[in-house]
Amino acid sequence: MERREDGRDWPYRVDPYGFERPEDFDYASYEAFFSRYLVVLTRRAIKWSKLLKGKNSIQKSLKVKRYIRKGIPNEHRALIWMIVSGAQTNMEQNPGYYHRLLEGEKNDKLVEAIKTDMNRTFPDNVKFRKTADPCLQHTLYNVLVAYGHHNKAVGYCQGMNFIAGYLILITKSEEESFWLLDALIGRILPDYYSPAMLGLKTDQEVLGELVKMKVPAVAELMERHGVMWTLVVSRWFICLFIDILPVETVLRIWDCLFYEGSKIIFRVALTLIKQHQAFILEATNFPDICDKFKEITKGTFVTECHSFMQVNSLQLLVATN
C-alpha cells in the first residue's frame, strides 16, 4: 500500500466517489468537518428510514421538501431523485426503451463526439480510468449515446458528460442515470444544452438582474469593468457546480435541484456572491474579478456542505421576495 510523507495510506487519497484528493488537501480540516457531519448524516438516515418505512415510494409534501433540503442520505439518494424528478414514472412507463436505443442505428457524428470526450471526463476519478475494473467510461458512453438518440434536438454537448458521470456514481445504474439525465435536460433545465443554449443564456441574465437587486455593489463592479456574467458563472450553470464545489456540496445542491427545479442554482449563486461580497469588491480590474469568482468556490464555507445549505436555504427568501 502506498504511503505518503504525511503518513496517509493510498485509500485516503481517494474520496468515497473515486476522486483523487489534491496534494495540498487539508486532511485535518476535512476530518474535523466530517466528524461533525457524520452526526448529521446518522440523524438524517434514521429520519429518512422512518419516512420511507421500507417502501420504494414517497409523496411530495412540505415535510419531504424540508427533509430534502436537509440532505438525502446516500443510501436513499438515487431512489429519491428518481421519484421526485419524475424519472421513475417515465422509466416504468417505457420498459425496454433505454436498451432499444442502444441497440438501434447510431449517428456516427454523435458517437464520435461522445468518444472524444471520454478520456476528458473526470481524469482525477479512478473509476473512470481505462485501467479501472469495471471502467465507468463504458457505462458513461452508453448513457450519452442513448440520450443523444432519444433527444435528437440536443444530441450531445460538452457538460453533459460530467452530469451523466455524477448520476452514474450515485445510481450505479445505466438506465436510471439515463432517465435522470432526461429529467434534468428535458424538463428541469430546458434549453440549457440545446445548440442555441437559450435557457442557459436567459438564466445567466436573470442571475445578473438578481445580483443588481440583492448585491448592487457587485453588479456595479462588474459593469464598471465590463465583465459579463457568462464569463464568471457559465460553468456554474453548465456543469451544475461539478468541479466547481466539493462533491458532497454538489450532491446536496442536486437533492434540491431534482425536487425544486432550477431556482436552486440561483440560490447557490447568490449565496456565494453575497457571502463573499467584501472579498469580490477588493477586485480592481477585469482579471482580478475573474480570479475572485474562482476563489469564492473554495475553502471551508463551501466544504461544510450542511451549514452551506442552511445559509443557502435563507437565500430562498432573498431570491424570491
Image: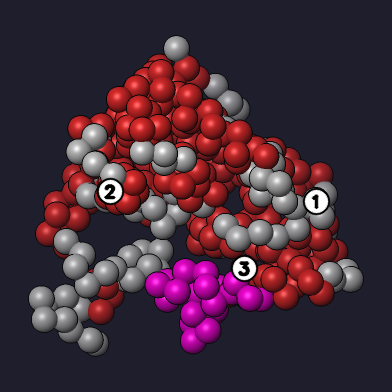
Residue 94 percent coordinates (x, y):
82, 49
Question: What is the number of the mark on residue 140?
Answer: 3
The mark closer to the camera, 3 or 1, is: 1
Task: Read off the residue under disc 2.
Answer: 288
Question: What is the number of the mark on residue 161?
Answer: none
The mark closer to the camera, 3 or 2, is: 2
**Which three-letter amino acid code belongs to the residue tagged 3?**
Leu
**Which three-letter amino acid code belongs to the residue tagged 2?**
Asp
Where disc 3 sits, the SS reads: helix
Q: Of the two numbered discs 3 and 1 on the same chain, state the one appearing first in sequence.
A: 3
Residue 130 within the segment the image draws in magenta: yes
Residue 120 within the segment the image draws in magenta: yes
Res. 119 image quadrant: bottom right
Residue 21 percent coordinates (x, y):
29, 68
* Residue extent of the magenta highlight: 115-136
| Quadrant where the N terminus is found in the figure | bottom left
What colour scheme has been applied to the protein in the rendered image?
Answer: secondary structure
